[in-house]
Image: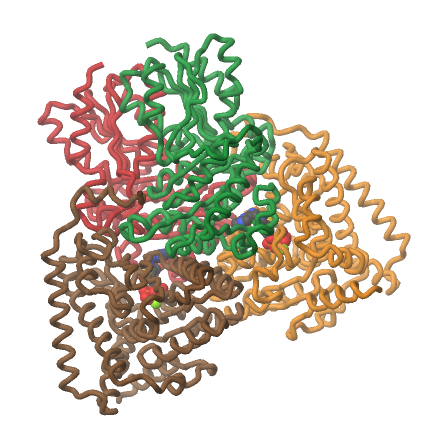
Chain colours: A red, B brown, C orange, D green
């Protein structure tokens, strides 16, 4: 079935709400979602399962935690990634630590959905990509789908997972469209090799995956055979797939939508720099968002965000090094 | 008037049911000059025209990013900010163009900011949701619902500490009143007797979520009571009532009686944001269109006040037309200014992350 | 009684000034069996003895990390948890030993947890602040002030959704009632009519910060009013009053009247935490020692209830002594159990980060 | 003057309160602080400047932000690092972004103080070391003093800085004592070379600095000449001092108290793996806290936290590699 990324989200929600009566969906304006990814769900499943909430993010996330501890499967749509901060205590002190500090007495089938809105002139408070913050908070799974199939399959996997999962959708991908196999199950923790290559590995996170794929023709033109890997999930991180590739190519560029400092890209780099040092033929290149809050003016944001041009330059640059 | 309309009327009357404590504030300050009244009208017209232009430019794709206008709510903006003095502080939220204009912002700079230009109030870094101008007492605008209240408490704290006589007014919506910060800040303002006005614009809706689904009561002013903060519910469509209420709140604060919460009942005439996607939301049925149309027809703050001033012989229709013409002209100038202004230079992306 | 004491008495009377809505709950449920009453007393004694042991072992360095005991507040723990049924849920905070015991926790496992042993309720991973046992309806305890309320709303939501008839009771202090989550959760519980009891233990202090410095009112029950949630203020030193109030709250919730807030006025006899550092805090003068001593002498819930049961001929002094002896013995056993239990195995450090 | 780390904090607060009447200090129980680092300040400066707050972290941090925007110099003591999450929105969406989104219209002389309490049996909710989370949030300066002198001088620098600074004190160091020069000014953004060496660079963060210095004798015993660098501040990060050392030694181990994933250690490693690749003679070693929430039982925490033993092993291990 051909679907956009946004529709894929809706279809995954629909399917899980259908499959299991214990699934409930909380969110502000969830009954009338502007982006269409909850279209009609309230009519199908009713207001008891598709629940408009007050503007009380901490209470809502906590409610979803408590309900999950008591047998429901809960989904909270917090819409914009920056709103995670409003509920941060419930996420970092409660959701992330419940399994561990109560030593597995409870299941916590909780999914928190947010979108990242960079490159949309949404300015500083609506454009963050804070997945690294949650990677530094053990106890949370984190997925970052970058295409409709992953958006669909990873959301379903997130919902049925008995651990808290933060599902970062990338709003810049919302209208990409492709065939989605609704029977394809993607386990959380499996990276995907988007295209095989032998010269350099390009590890991509979230929206950077599409950017990297878009510049494939240019790389081929330059006679660079790139192996592009989409991590798809950050916790657990499928480091083996990445390592396998880097062992083969000996070169790697990592592209992340997050701010550079303590990014997922930095984390992956640090693992490779310790474990695969002798396989590397060149420095590990990173393209990430500069350490600057997000400006409103588009030209300013283009300066600091990861772009096709920047990834291209970095790949070419890393190719030029010779050990 | 058909039956349907009269049902709506009763709903609205109910919505506007004002709390018993609400004195007839208009009596207390009978000393507003006619020129001041006309100035209130002019400011409302300026805001309306500004917002209409912004609405169009957003639809045309000339303005990027989220844009929230205050069409229908101008009496709150103008009544409040006219009652404040120049040096008083305001803290805005996502819907802040109106306050800025009412407080005296240069509309050229404001429009330039909304266009993302280097000449904007924030040099193009903030945009519509974060317009800010310390020279008119604006402490910025935060797009995170409920997050302005703590900052406003801080401004009020500073004024109290320095004894500079300033009042801080923070604007927020009915939606924001369900955030935890509302509670924490009411309590703080109470125990520290902060010189602050909590200005709750109750338009009964947050994006598509009606207040009646997320609050046990459609009235919110009484949430102040358990903190020992005095509160009033007023008709937010009546600019004089807003003005006088704020004047009396200021007086009460200056007497040392502490913070005040004012709940202004109002109506958002447009959708939550501007732009095509949001325009479509008007058809999904989250709120009663006829009710909104009724407000637009009968509770437009500009129409109401124009009519009143004409009836009281304070202004002539022709003079009002003249104001419209002038303000149209000003807004056109602002658009032109924003248009010809340049975008920020690329290296500006890296400035002011930290202050040197 | 000297003059100073009588001033304190009046302060305390004031502190215990009970709200007008407070019916004489004791009349409504005259059907408590004598055996039940004795069981209330026994549970309070068990908790007291448990906490006293914990206090000593913390001073001795045998227990590591932060430990908060509930000495003085046993009537709240016992009154509430005895009124709840076994399958009802409780959500605790940093000071949770008492609820756990009152709800039926095995004290061996509880003590083992506080000792950090593998046999503890949480396998040694939680410790004193996070004791948790789903088998007795405990949904754990969170040491972040105010953070348990949302989780409790979730439990109540699940019960409502599944229609399983369970009630959730969340315990929190006067300090916690100033956190934003209090407001958000009161509102949520109200609009969703959640089957939840908000049990506010008002001991008038948060660590060293007196309620009077951080709240406009020493009474907190009225904070429920603006949400349309019914609330009661009760004497938290009177176990029967607590018990009956909770019983009546449960009845009211089961009638579909929605959430209830109960404010139990009480007193923390010990310092905020146990251990030498905190013992020293009793001398810094943040609270009136004489007032605390007055509570200890005259408002000890165990003494009060023992005397009442003796006066009513429900129990003899010798029987009470027997209870003490038995409970002492139980606690000694618990200590022995905790002591001989092994620490978790090192590889356990890596288990249950995620559930498989 | 000989001072403990805790006393140094108090002396710095005292000095800044003395020097400038516009300095105010907010905190829960700040008037009667258990650890002594605000002893007597309320008696000296009064309740208007040393302010006991309600348990309302979001409101208090926001109050400090607003007051700082209006000309006061504000300090908030949030005590335990995990409580940062309760005020996360005010920190990440407001404090961090105020300078930038308002384009420098305001100064923001705000210092947020917290302590990290790992290795004290404080369990999951009171033991986090979340400095990496704030490194990924541009707009905040971050300091991590590891000795009394730094605790003193960096706190003074943080208070007078016109930007928001998060000051992480490490509770495990609270009773270390040394001579403190009260006239010594340490600018934020300057690492410190604790001991010079030629074989390997050991970059340390927060409490790891003391651990590393403690094992110096053992390293000397093994004939390993280690250059130990304490970063002291994480934003801005003095990467030049680190690079200079690694260029010399060619080997590096980074020790961080934070959880490994997206740690400050990973960030530093990623910079070196890109910029100094050809200077490195061996893999970049990292010792950090395993990605596990903090357990209560002491033996469990010792398993997962950075220890002397682990740093020693890592250094020896990295020394064994030969390019
Ligand atoms: C914490 C947070 N949650 C959600 C949003 C998305 N959002 C922006 S405005 C808004 C509605 C606010 O409603 P209200 O406070 O009543 O103000 P109004 O828009 O009616 O003026 C929402 C949900 C946000 N910006 N911040
Ligand atoms: C969010 C947060 N802030 C501060 C603390 C530190 N702290 C632990 S208990 C406590 C006092 C709580 O007072 P109250 O809620 O009245 O409960 P009590 O201790 O009196 O039972 C404080 C400040 C914390 N654990 N969490
Ligand atoms: Mg509204
Ligand atoms: Mg208390």
Answer left or right for A225 relative to A284.
Answer: left
**Ligand 3 - quadrant of the structure image:** bottom left
Residue A311 screen position, x and y as percent = 19, 32
Q: Nearest the camera: D289 or A231? A: D289
Q: As rendered, which of D204 and B60 lies closer to the eye?
A: D204
**Residue drawn at point x = 26 percent, y = 59 percent:** B131
A7 relative to C172 in the view: left or right: left
Image position of B324 with respect to D10: above or below: below
Look at 11% across and 23% down and name the residue there. A223
Q: Is residue D156 visible?
A: yes
Residue B27 % position (x, y):
39, 87
Q: Is residue A321 above or below residue B85?
A: above
Is residue A11 or residue B291 the one in the foreground?
A: B291
Q: Is residue A94 left or right of residue A130?
A: right
- Count every numbered label the image shows and give the total: 0
Percent position of residue A35, x then y: 26, 55
The N terminus of chain C, quarter of image: bottom right
Residue D323 lies, in percent from the top left, at 32, 10
- The answer to whether residue C134 is seen in the rendering is no
- Is D150 drawn above or below residue B152 in the view shown? above
- Quarter of image, res A153: top left
> Residue visible at 16% across and 25% down?
A316
């Amino acid at each position: 079935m051909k679907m956009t990324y946004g529709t894929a989200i809706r279809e995954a929600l629909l399917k899980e709400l259908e499959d299991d009566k214990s699934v409930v969906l909380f969110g502000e304006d969830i009954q009338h979602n502007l982006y269409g990814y909850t279209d009609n769900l309230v009519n199908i499943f009713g207001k008891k399962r598709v629940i408009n909430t007050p503007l009380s993010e901490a209470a809502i996330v906590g409610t979803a935690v408590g309900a999950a501890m008591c047998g429901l499967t809960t989904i909270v749509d917090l819409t914009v990634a920056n709103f995670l901060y409003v509920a941060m205590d419930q996420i970092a002190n409660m959701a992330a630590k419940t399994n561990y500090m109560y030593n597995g007495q409870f299941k916590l089938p909780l999914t928190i959905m947010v979108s990242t809105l960079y490159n949309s002139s949404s300015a500083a408070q609506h454009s963050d990509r804070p997945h690294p913050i949650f990677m530094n908070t053990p106890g949370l799974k984190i997925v970052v789908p970058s295409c409709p199939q992953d958006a669909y399959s990873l959301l379903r996997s997130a919902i049925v997972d008995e651990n808290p999962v933060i599902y970062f959708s990338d709003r810049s991908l919302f209208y990409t469209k492709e065939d989605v196999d609704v029977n394809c199950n993607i386990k959380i923790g499996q990276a995907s090799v988007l295209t095989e290559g032998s010269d350099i590995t390009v590890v991509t996170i979230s929206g950077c995956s599409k950017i990297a794929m878009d510049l494939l023709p240019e790389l081929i033109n330059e006679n660079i055979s790139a192996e592009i890997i989409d991590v798809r999930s950050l916790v657990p991180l499928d480091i083996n797939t990445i390592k396998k590739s880097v062992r083969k190519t000996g070169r790697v560029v990592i592209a992340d939508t997050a701010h550079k400092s303590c990014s997922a890209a930095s984390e992956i780099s640090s693992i490779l720099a310790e474990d695969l040092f002798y396989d590397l033929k060149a420095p590990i290149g990173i393209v990430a968002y500069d350490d600057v809050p997000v400006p409103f003016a588009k030209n300013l944001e283009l300066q600091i965000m990861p772009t096709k041009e920047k990834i291209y330059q970095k790949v070419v640059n890393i190719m030029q090094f010779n050990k | 008037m058909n039956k349907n309309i009269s049902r709506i009327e009763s709903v609205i009357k109910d919505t506007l049911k004002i709390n018993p404590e609400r004195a007839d504030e208009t009596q207390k300050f009978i000393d507003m000059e006619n020129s001041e009244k006309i100035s209130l009208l002019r400011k409302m017209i300026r805001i309306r025209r500004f917002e209409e232009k912004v609405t169009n430019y957003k639809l045309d794709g000339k303005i990027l990013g989220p844009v929230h206008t205050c069409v229908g709510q101008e009496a709150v903006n103008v009544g409040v900010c006219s009652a404040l003095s120049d040096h008083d502080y305001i803290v805005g939220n996502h819907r802040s163009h109106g306050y800025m204009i009412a407080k005296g912002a240069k509309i050229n700079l404001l429009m330039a900011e909304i266009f993302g230009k280097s000449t904007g109030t924030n040099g193009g870094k903030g945009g519509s949701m974060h317009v800010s101008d310390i020279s008119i007492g604006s402490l910025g605008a935060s797009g995170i619902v409920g997050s302005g209240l703590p900052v406003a408490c801080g401004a009020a704290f500073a004024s109290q500490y320095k004894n500079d006589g300033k009042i801080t007014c923070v604007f927020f919506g009915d939606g924001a009143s369900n955030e935890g910060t509302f509670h924490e800040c009411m309590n703080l303002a109470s125990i520290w007797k902060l010189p602050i006005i909590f200005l709750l614009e109750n338009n009964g809706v947050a994006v598509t979520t009606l207040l009646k689904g997320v609050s046990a009561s459609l009235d919110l002013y009484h949430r102040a009571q358990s903190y020992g903060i005095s509160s009033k519910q007023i008709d937010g469509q009546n600019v004089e009532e807003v003005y006088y209420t704020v004047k009396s709140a200021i007086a009460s604060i200056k007497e040392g009686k502490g913070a005040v919460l004012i709940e202004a009942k109002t109506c958002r005439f447009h959708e939550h944001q501007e732009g095509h996607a949001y325009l479509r939301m008007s058809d999904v049925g989250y709120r009663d269109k006829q009710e909104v149309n009724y407000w637009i027809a009968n509770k437009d703050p500009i129409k109401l006040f124009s009519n009143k001033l004409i009836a009281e012989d304070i202004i002539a229709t022709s003079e009002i037309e003249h104001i419209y013409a002038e303000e149209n002209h000003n807004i056109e100038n602002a658009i032109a200014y924003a248009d010809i202004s340049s975008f920020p230079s690329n290296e500006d992306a890296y400035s002011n992350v930290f202050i040197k």
